[in-house]
């Protein structure tokens, strides 16, 4: 048996809970409108119900010990109906403004992200070109060095052959040496 002051507090609590439920539900629906038929929206709605019922029970616990009578559910529905009848049009522009502001911020973020990605892509292309040029220069330098070594080896070989010819001259013709 619930005492009269507790019943009155429970009536007021359920009425305002219904009103707040309708307010937050309409706001959440407007904010998650773009998830029309997605699983994400179903998950958000389910979590919303769990959180709201938990908070409602937590508020009702000190008043009635967490008990809810059938007529209190009707008072809850009446609070939601009064919000929808009289206050929904008042708060609807607020939710629209929040959505417009959020979309504007997201658009700005996307634009900025695209600009940043373009700059990063341009810098990476420049870095890639510089790296390719540096690699090309290193290859040319390496080839030049290699050619210089080859020329040096060839020169040494020619000098050795010339020295060998001076020390050991070959006979000009074997047939003329016999005569």
Image: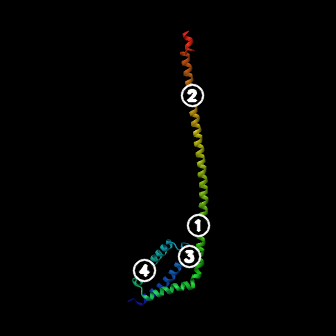
Q: Which mark is residue 106?
A: 1
- At numbered mark 2, what does the secondary structure look like: helix, strand or loop? helix
Kindly identify which residue carries mark 3.
30
Crowd around label 2: few <14 · some 14–19 · many ≥20 (10 Å): few
In the picture shown, does residue 69 fall above or below 155? below
C-alpha span from label 1 to label 4: 36 Å
60 or 82, which lies in front? 82
- At numbered mark 3, what does the secondary structure look like: helix, strand or loop? helix
* Residue at horizontal 59 percent and vertical 45 percent from the top: 132
C-alpha span from label 3 to label 1: 16 Å
48 or 163, which lies in front? 163
Q: Which mark is residue 57?
A: 4
How is the structure coloured here? rainbow
Judged by depth in the image, the label closer to the viewer, 1 or 4, is 1
Please report contact status of discs 2 and 3: CB closer than 8 Å, yes or no: no
C-alpha span from label 2 to label 4: 94 Å
Whichever of callouts 3 and 4 sits on the residue coming sooner in the sequence is 3
* Residue at horizontal 57 percent and vertical 39 percent from the top: 139
Judged by depth in the image, the label closer to the viewer, 2 or 1, is 2
- At numbered mark 1, what does the secondary structure look like: helix, strand or loop? helix
């Amino acid at each position: 048996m619930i005492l009269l002051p507790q019943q009155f507090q429970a009536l007021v609590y359920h009425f305002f809970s219904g009103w707040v439920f309708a307010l937050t539900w309409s706001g959440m629906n407007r904010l998650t409108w773009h998830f029309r038929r997605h699983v994400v929206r179903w998950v958000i709605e389910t979590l919303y119900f769990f959180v709201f019922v938990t908070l409602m029970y937590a508020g009702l616990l000190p008043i009635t010990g967490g008990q809810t009578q059938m007529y209190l559910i009707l008072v809850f529905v009446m609070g939601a109906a009064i919000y929808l009848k009289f206050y929904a049009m008042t708060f609807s522009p607020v939710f629209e403004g929040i959505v417009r502001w959020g979309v504007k911020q997201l658009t700005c973020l996307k634009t900025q992200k695209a600009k940043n990605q373009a700059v990063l892509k341009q810098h990476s292309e420049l870095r890639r070109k510089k790296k390719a040029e540096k690699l090309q220069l290193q290859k040319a330098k390496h080839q030049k060095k290699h050619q210089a070594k080859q020329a040096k080896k060839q020169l040494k070989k020619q000098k050795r052959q010339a020295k060998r010819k001076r020390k050991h001259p070959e006979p000009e013709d074997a047939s003329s040496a016999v005569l």
